[in-house]
Image (cartoon, rainbow, N blue to C red):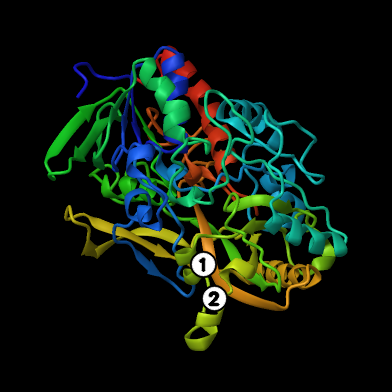
Amino acid sequence: MPSEIPDVAIVGAGACGCLVANELVKKGFSVVVLEAGSRLDPARDLPNSEGNAAKIMWNEPRVYSGKHPIVPKTGTGVGGGTLTWLGVMPRFHPADFRTDSTEGVGADWPIAYEDVRPYYERVEREFGLAGECGPFAPEQYNLPMPPHRMNWHAQVLARGARKLGASPFAPPMAINSTEYDGRPACTYCGWCGSGCVIGAKATANQVYLARAEKGGAKVISNAFVHRIGYDTGRRRVTGLAYLDEQNEEHELNARSVVLAAHAIETSRLLLLSANLTFPNGLANSSGLVGRGFMSHPTWQVFGTFDEPINAFKGMQMGHVMVQDYYRPDRKNGYARGFALISYMMTPLTYANLSGSMYGTELKEFLDDYSHTAAWWAHAEGLPSDANAITLDWGIKDRRGLPVARLTYEWGSNDLKLAAAARDKAMEMMEASGARKVRVGLNYGAHAMGGCRMGLDRERSVVNPFGQSHDIPNLFVCDTSVFVTGSGLNPTLTAMAIATRSTEYIADAARRGELS
């Protein structure tokens, strides 16, 4: 425990929390980071094993409900989701921030691509990205490392894409193609999602948090924050209450609080922190905390070939991407667009993503593992306030706290768009020469929204810098602030927006506006 009151307490040691800690320490602020999970040494604690999921993926109870229940993958531990993520980091496109203006769907963000551009560049350089921006990028830009070579799996997928007139490319990846910043190049062992034992995959703890700690930041792991303190008279948050591994309560006072616990747990914490001033959840005068929850509708499409593909030899995801169908086209019969990404997983996950297969069909599918290639068809899910994160008071976690209930239903455009992505992936797989094409699981990927940013305090939770409309010294710096989700992987954009927010936090603190 720190002996003095820190300037900033950050909840969550994931991609954004670690980044915010480093940025604020560089600006001269004292910082304490609290993380619900453990602190692990990858070389010692994360040997190549699918059993690592129990260590680095969120496995506490949640309730998944609604017409289309979704179970987005989320991480835990110091490093957060970057411990188990697969490292794909494309930029959003300008139109992704203007879906209402350009297509009459979703909503416009209060910020534009131009506002985020310089922070994209910073994160790409600091985190260390390898790859190409691709022919359909929002603009042509260079990354600090050359692209990964296409493994045989990617080459097989790419030949089908080219036959259909598409332009496959090696996308931006936060996995080293060469030695970078003291971390080695990838050895293509294929265990990305189980934790990278050599450090070739960028994780927030080894890149940002390590620097923050050298600058004086303190980290408290196994600290489950369950309440944010609030001073009614001053209209300011006062700190955090958390439970340790023995379920003993501790309090940490702080001058400001930044929530970076990812979309689901950030909303849950605000709802758990309800008080007399905010009976429906802290900083929730709009009633929108937890609302506008989003995910990406995806399909897994597999192709089995006569020759061995051995897709497990290489990065699990991102040796090749296709964005030819990402740009909206009014002739499509649906709004927005989709991307196709190579994704071949380890055997247990391969079985889980088989979808509705069973019996003989499932056994044949499993037996075909080394001869199978896979596209991940990845589309945009539009926001709806009916899709929500709430508290389920009927189910408690091991601490006795109500768990998060995720209520979800895909909209008609989501279903049309995801189906178009699936069908294109099937067509490409056939063009690649697959003797059998199988459609696997349809599922929701990534968690976004719940504390959306905006200029109107009645229609949003935070301002364009992640600052609560209700409480000046409370900030949200994670995917919770997303207004729409785009059809691309969200981590780079979340980190870029969080970097932008740190400048605002520092300036506001120095002006005395947060005290």
Q: How many marks?
A: 2
Q: Is residue 449 visible?
A: no
Outermost residue on the front side: it is 307
Q: Which quarter of the figure has residue 370?
A: bottom right
Image-based side of 414 in relation to 166, left or right = left
**Occupied quadrant, residue 303:** bottom right
Question: Residue 401, image x and y in percent?
Answer: 21, 54
Q: Looking at the picture, which amino acid does disc 2 mark? A: Asp
Residue toward you, 141 or 40: 40
Mark 1–mark 2 distance (CA, rounded to whole Å): 11 Å
Q: Is residue 182 visible?
A: yes
Amino acid type indicated by mark 1 = Tyr
Element assignment for label 1:
helix
- From the image, tell me which residue sits under label 1: 350
Give the crowd class for mark 1: few <14, some 14-19, many >=20 residues within 10 Å.
some
Q: Tag 2 or tag 1, which sits nearer the N-term?
A: 1
The quarter of the rendered structure image containing the N terminus is: top left
Label 2 crowd (10 A; few <14 / some 14-19 / many >=20): few
* Whether label 1 touches label 2, CB < 8 Å: no
Where residue 182 appears, as percent x and y from the top left, is 52, 23
Residue beneath the point at 41% across and 32% down: 205
As rendered, which of 121 and 264 lies closer to the eye? 121
In the image, 337 versus 85, the foreground residue is 85
Picture quadrant of residue 380: bottom right
Q: Which mark is residue 367?
A: 2
Task: Judge from the rendering whether residue 110 lies leftward or rightward of residue 17; answer left or right.
Answer: right
Q: Is residue 287 above or below residue 186?
A: below
Image quadrant in which the C terminus is located: top left
Question: Whole-percent x and y of residue 72?
Answer: 46, 59
The answer to which of 110 and 81 lies nearer the viewer is 81
